[in-house]
Structure formats: C-alpha cells, structure tokens
Image (cartoon, rainbow, N blue to C red):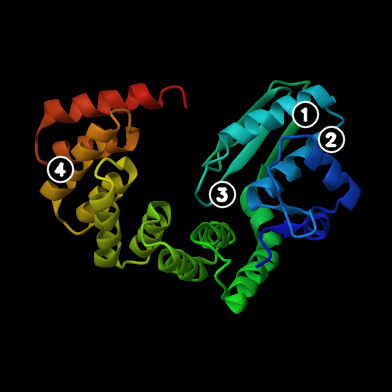
Amino acid sequence: MVKGYSTREVAELLHLPEARVRAFARAGFLHPTRGERSEYRFSFQDIVLLRAAKQLDDAAVPSKRVWKALRSLQEQLPANRSLATVRISAAGDDVVVRDSAAAWEPYSGQAVLEFDVGELAQEAAPMVRQAARHAREADDDETTADDWYRIAIDLETVGAEERAVDAYERALEADPDHGEARINLGRLLHAAGRLRQAERHYRTVIEKSPSNALALFNLGVVLDDQGQAIAAREAYEAALEADADFADAHFNLARLHERSGQTAQALRHLSRYRVLTRST
C-alpha cells in the first residue's frame, strides 16, 4: 500500500511548486515518511502545517518567525483526532489553535495568518477518499492497524464519517487492541445514535486499560445519554482518578450533582473546571 500523500498531490492541493513543498519538508517542522523510492509521503497533519507555512511565507514573515510559529503550531495541533473544526490564527511569533469559530484578534501591525482547517479539508476530500479507496482495493497485509487509523482520522476530517467508521473497523480487524481506534469508533457510533455499540467499545478499551481517562469519560457521556446518571457519575469519577485535571469530567460531574441537588459537590467540580480552563 502507498502510504500518505505524494509531493505532487500536496503541491496541486496547495497551489505550490513541488520544489517548494520539498524545501518546506527539508526545513524540519514536518514529519513526512518515505516511500519505496525514498520520495516524501505526507500526512494530513503535514498538509495543515504546509498550508500555514505557505501563508506565512506569502505574507513575507521573516524565516526565523515562520519556523518559530510553525513549531508552536505543530505542538498545538490536536493529535489523533479530526482537525475539521480547528481554526488557526497567528500574529508575529504567536500561534493560536482553537476548536471553535471564534476569531482571535491580533495586535495591529503584525503579519496575520488565519484559516479554518475545515476549508482545507473540503479541498482535500477527493484526495483523502481516493487514498482510502486504494487501501480498500489493495486489501493486503501491509496495511496496518495504524495505517487504517490514520486513514480514518483523515476521512473524519473531510466529513466522510461512514467511511471513517469502516476504516476504524478495519483497524480493529488488524489489531483488536488498538485503543485509539476503538475510542474514535465509539465516538462516531455515539454521534450516530448507536449508543449501546459505542458503550461496548468504550468498555472493551477499559477492560484492557482501566486507567484510560478518555475511554472512561466517553463511557460516562454515553451512559448519561442513556439516562443512567449514577453509572455515568461513577465513570466520570473514575476518569478523574486516572486524570485529576480532566476538565470536561469536572464539568459533567458538576452538572450531574446540580441535577440531583448536591450543590456543594457541583460547585466544587465547577470551580475546578474554571481553574483548569482559565488559561485556555
């Protein structure tokens, strides 16, 4: 299987000369793999960084600031999940990545970068779907669970949720213990209203990894949505035992305690949630 996106595909998508794409790749802020002929193969995360690099470069931002901003952006981009709702803004050396459509107001007089990854995702959709189709047609042992997992994330990013479900399921066929794929599959099934199936996937992860805070939190959400408030509370509490700073678990516990009239506990968790999210 050919893994990742070629220099030519990326160049056409971003309207860049291939030589410029290769030059950015050599700069060190991307993590492309190498194909059978040692050619670059880019991930969707690389493409996001390349788009940012192009806009900063086109805005005549000094190279030193470009590399600093892109290193910051690389650190902030969400790992192992869809980028479709991400918005990227930069002014000077500062880069902000947000999961909402709220605009970031930069200081005046500085070069500004701002774009929605969702817009880029729509442009990239044909390329991502083609890569997934080629993987399905190849159907060989070289396509690993991690390969299918990355394909699924890219499919989510371009809004192809049903195909992403198929890719996550293929990842689990290759490796039933791939916890990240199972959690993401559960999340998509949950969003599609298939709550019992989602619950089973979360519980399977927890059986293998009892301290997986994300799986515990997601289990709490799906139990809450099924009206099982007590079980949901226990799952959120277990998530906090695994990660005491899991802000959303504090928030959801505050809501459950408030609903049951336990005001003191609700305020305690809400206060902690505010502390944890104050700087974000």
Residue bearing mark 2: 57
Residue located beneath label 3 in the image: 83
From the image, tell me which residue sits under label 4.
234
> Residue 54, can we see it?
no
Q: Callout 2: helix, strand or loop?
A: helix
**Is disc 4 surrounded by few (<14), some (14 to 19) or many (20+) residues within 10 Å?**
some
Instruction: Identify the residue position indicated by label 1 in the image.
Output: 66
Query: Does label 1 or label 3 sit earlier along the sequence?
Result: 1
Residue 268 in which image quadrant: top left
Q: Earlier in the sequence, mark 1 or mark 4?
A: 1
Q: Amino acid at mark 3?
A: Leu
Quick check: 135 above or below 63?
Answer: below
Which element carries disc 1, helix, strand or loop?
A: helix
Query: Tag 4 or tag 3, which sits nearer the N-term?
Result: 3
Dot 3 or dot 2: first in sequence order is 2
Instruction: Estimate the x, y position of residue 22 in percent, counting from the top left.
Output: 84, 46
| Distance from Cα at disc 1 to Cα at disc 4 | 46 Å
Q: Residue 28's image quarter? A: top right
Q: Residue at x 30, y 60 (%)?
A: 201
Q: Residue at x 37, y 66 (%)?
A: 192
Can residue 67 be seen in this snapshot? yes
Q: Position of residue 110 (x, y in %)?
A: 77, 23
Distance Cα–Cα, label 1 vs label 3: 21 Å
Observer-nearest residue: 32 or 215?
Answer: 32
Q: From the viewer's perspective, is 136 left or right of 223? A: right
Q: Mark 1 and mark 2 in contact (Cβ < 8 Å)?
A: yes
Residue at the location (21% across, 34% down)?
254
Front-most of 52 and 28?
Answer: 28
